[in-house]
Every structure is written in structure tokens, then in C-alpha cells.
Amino acid sequence: SAQNPLVKVMGFQCEKGGSEAPFNELMAPDIITGKHLNLCGACRKRLTDRSLFIWLAAVAALAISLYLWRHYHPTVWLACFAWNMFLLQVVESLCTVPHELGHAMTARWMGFKVDRIIIGLGRRLGSFQFAGFQWDICARPFGGYVKFEQIAISNWRWRAVAVWAAGPLTNILLACGALVLLPSDAGKALDLGGTVSLWVLFIIANALMGLINLIPFVVNMPQLGLVPSDG
């Protein structure tokens, strides 16, 4: 059938279902799949739902495999190391919450208007209100971002620097506090090839997150596009 000539001006042809996709339904490539397709809203939702299911199934399969390898071969260094690295990534993802909360609370204290706190990357799964902020939870639990408005206030550059430093500082303070309170029976605390307690992994995760986020980089947030890291 002949294509509607208005599609060339007002929108795009959906590359998945063949239907006309108005311009306001065109969305950026999904960060989970990395596909660059012009999709209507319905087709993109089906694609991201399927990709999300595959991604979650792969993570679950990896977790079960690493656990069983570690459980049945507790003396194999590589098995212990791989399981500890997986747990470290999980704990580090959880440490994103206080990190972004540190940014948001400091931004509010400095006089900025905080729009929302985004936890994770990819498609937004839901949102809720907590501690006076809107929290958006996204599909891939890695990283986060605080969106705030740089309103006209005095010394706003120094205030923005304070907001940028607040996240890493929060993680470093948590790591130092947990290190001081480290139980005496923690054993081989830094032996990642052996048995490592969640307490020690919490210290390592916060220390890594605090140090890594002191380095500026660019984040691809589907809701916001390419944005500089907030620290």
C-alpha cells in the first residue's frame, strides 16, 4: 500500500510493525538492546519487555551458576572469586541509593530544586515518593542520576560543586564508618578468593563507588539523553 506522504513530514514508518509512528511516539534506542529502530510506542514496549525478560533471565542464570560452582567447589579460588565479584556488584548497586540521596539532599540544602532521583538505567519500571523526593526505578540496576534545576542563586557554581562532591563523599563516609565497626571475626577481610562477609563487601563497594565517581564521565540516560555525571 502507498505510504502516507504526511509520515515523511509528521513522523516515521515503524520499522517493526509497519504502521505509521507519529513523531511524538518516536523514542531513543533502548539501552538494554542497543537497537537503533524507529518504533511506534506499542512495538517499542513489546521489544523492551522481551529484552528485559531475557536480561533478567540471564542474570538469574548467572547467579545460580556461580552460587552452585562456589557451593560445590569451595576450595577453588576462581569459583570463590567469581561469586564474590557477583555479590560485590549487587552490593554496589544497592550503594547507589545512599549515593544519589547524598546528591539530592545536598542539592536541596544548597537551594536547588530537585526534580527526581533516577536509580538504574534503561526503561523506567515505576516511581514512588521517599524522603521528599520522587524516585524512578529503571530496568538495569547499574548507576543513577539526580536531576535538579540550576536556578538563579548566588555562588551557584560552588553550590553545584558541593552537590557533585556529596555523592562520593557519602560513600566514602559509609566505607570508613563500616571499617571502624568491622567485626573482629571478619576473618580474611580482603581475600576475594575465599569467604568474604557482606560487611566487607559493603566497605569495598562504597570505597570503589566513592573513588570512581570522582572521575567525570558522560551518562546515557534514556529519560534525559547524554548528561554529565553528577559525581
Image (cartoon, rainbow, N blue to C red):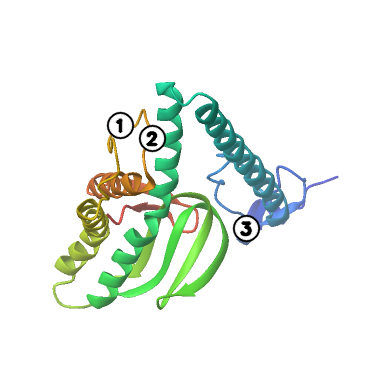
> 217 or 191: which is nearer to us?
191
- Can residue 5 be seen by looking at this rendering? no
- Decide: is 94 above or below 191: below
Do the residues bearing badges 1 and 2 touch, measured as CB atoms within 8 Å? yes
Disc 2 marks a residue whose amino acid type is Thr
The label number, if any, that marks residue 191 in the structure image: 1
Location of mark 3 (residue): 23
> 86 or 79: which is nearer to us?
79
Disc 3 marks a residue whose amino acid type is Phe
Location of mark 2 (residue): 195
Pick whichever of labels 3 and 2 is earlier in the sequence. 3
Q: Position of residue 209 (x, y in %)?
A: 30, 48
> Which residue is outermost to the front?
185
Answer few, some or many: residues within 10 Å of disc 1's Cα (few below 14, many 20 plus, some between 14 and 19): few
Q: Tag 1's secondary structure?
A: loop
Q: Where is residue 217 in the image (x, y as percent from the top left)?
A: 30, 45
Quadrant of the rendered image containing residue 25: bottom right
